[in-house]
Image (cartoon, rainbow, N blue to C red):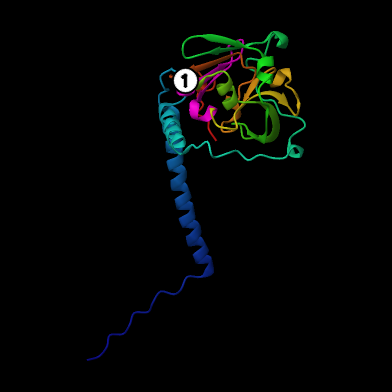
Amino acid sequence: MMNKPKKPGKPPLTVEQKILRRNFISFTVFTGLGAAAYGGWTWLRTSPLEAKGVTAGARKPFRRALNQSEVASRKVFSSNNLARTYPKSRAAKFVRQNGAVGLKGEFKVDEWQMALKKKSGEVINISIDQIRALPKTELIFDFKCVEGWDQIQHWGGVSFLDFIDHFELNAEADMHYVGMQTPDKKYYVGIDMESILHPQTILAYEMNDLPLKINHGAPLRLIIPVKYGIKNLKRIGTLILSEERPADYWAERGYDYYSGL
């Protein structure tokens, strides 16, 4: 029995044909991904806004994503995870200032007092001299802004943990949130208790070994390395301990309430 002659195989692709084929595949994949991304962006941009509450200004799907991100972040948060620190020689001599909401208008530093609202409803007025009398803590770390820039900065003040202990706020430390406001109440933040009790959080009254300047929140501001800069409130006027989420300036304008690093 005679064997059937084999059909001649296809000639191998030339280098030029291979390049053209790869380019076609890449173009098709890129076009498909681009179309999917554009469709997703259009869907997100046209989705309804969230109902105004403690948070506002974001599209509903985006806010859901932010909330889920917060849940995941809080599950893995640990006070044992410390921000990297640096020698004083690495600290910026000119400390960048970003944002002046709550710092405008006439303000007399020597008349400042911070109103602390306790769980019982009692309000304690605390002077800067009382704060300075507590053990001093220094922190040199990489301050990070939500806008994308960062800078190594040197701050001095009282550890928030020492503040809690000195003013006998252990019952308040079992609550869920801390709220802070500037004296004029125009800027305000809400922070989860786990983050505010991080061992590197300080109530700062010094910058580069000198008293705070007015534009950096004199006489007292918050420095919290586990949060973006928008949570590091300048010029604390009121400190509130709460079971419910306090109001937050940027969360009302579409930003993440948690704003953790």
Residue drawn at (65%, 18%), measured in percent from left and top?
131
Figure quadrant of residue 141: top right
**For residue 239, side relative to residue 108 (left or right):** left
The foreground one among 27 and 255 is 255
Residue drawn at (48%, 9%), measured in percent from left and top?
121
The foreground one among 193 and 172 is 172
Q: Which residue is mark 1?
A: 171
Figure quadrant of residue 220: top right
Question: Can you give x and y, in whole percent of width and height, for residue 190 in the image?
Answer: 51, 21
Question: Can you give x and y, in whole percent of width and height, for residue 128 in the image?
Answer: 68, 15
Instruction: Give the vertical position of 209 relative to 19 (above or below).
Output: above
Question: Can you give x and y, in whole percent of width and height, for residue 36 in the image?
Answer: 42, 42
Kind of residue indicated by mark 1: Ala
**For residue 42, side relative to residue 92 (left or right):** left
Q: Quadrant of the C terminus?
A: top right
Circle 1 sits in a helix, a strand or a loop, which is it? Answer: helix
Residue drawn at (57%, 32%), measured in percent from left and top?
199
**For residue 115, side relative to residue 105 (left or right):** left
The foreground one among 174 and 243 is 174
The segment highlighted magenta reads 173-196
